[in-house]
Amino acid sequence: MSLEPQNPEEAYYRKLEARVANFLWVGTIVSAVLIAGGLALSFFEGPHAKNLSPVSPHDIWFGLRAMHPVAYETLGIIVLLALPVVRVAIGSVGFFRRREVQLGAIALAVLGVMVVSFALGAAHHG
């Protein structure tokens, strides 16, 4: 009994799943490094550090350039939150390529809910 795929389509999807798994793994590591780096920077700034709350990409970019810990932590959290969104998007493409329209539509609906929830959260806090 071999674990090798039986047909080219199955081989393609196994390779795609492996790439997605690697992407998620690398994204998690990048997020952890950013958050840990921000925490490490906060120890060096001490208790009298400026209280910066980056809320826009512009704020995050300039916070990163100025070595503000919260900017690194915020970017790490954004990367972490983006990982499942990317996974669902890739999954929906995979379903449609397999002509599994119902599952593709469900994945798109889930993606829509995720995007709307992020937009509503941003509007509420922005």
Image (spheres, grey):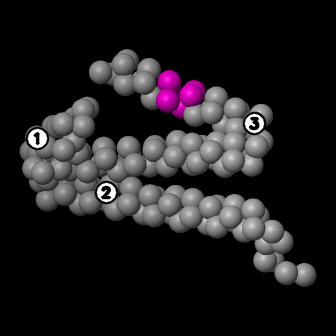
Residue 11, position as x, y percentages in the image: 72, 68
Q: Distance between the residues labelled 1 and 2?
A: 19 Å
Q: Are marks 1 and 2 in contact (CB under 8 Å)?
A: no
Q: Distance between the residues labelled 3 and 2?
A: 38 Å
Residue 12, position as x, y percentages in the image: 68, 64
Query: Left of 9 or right of it: where is 90?
Result: left
Query: Left of 59 or right of it: where is 117?
Result: right
Residue 74 belongs to the span the image colors magenta: no
Q: Main secondary structure of the magenta part?
A: helix
Quarter of image, res 95: top right
**Amino acid type, mark 1:** Lys
**Amino acid type, mark 2:** Leu
Q: Which residue sits at x=62%, y=61%? A: 16
> What number is the disc on residue 50?
1
**Amino acid type, mark 3:** Val
* Residue 125 vertical position relative to residue 92 in the rendered view, above or below: above
Q: Which residue sits at x=18%, y=37%? A: 59
Mark 3 sits on what residue?
A: 101
Q: How far apart are marks 1 and 3 (CA)?
A: 51 Å
Stretch of the chain drawn in magenta: 112-117
Q: Considering only order in the chain, which callout, 3 or 1, is on the residue closer to the N terminus?
A: 1
> What number is the disc on residue 34?
2
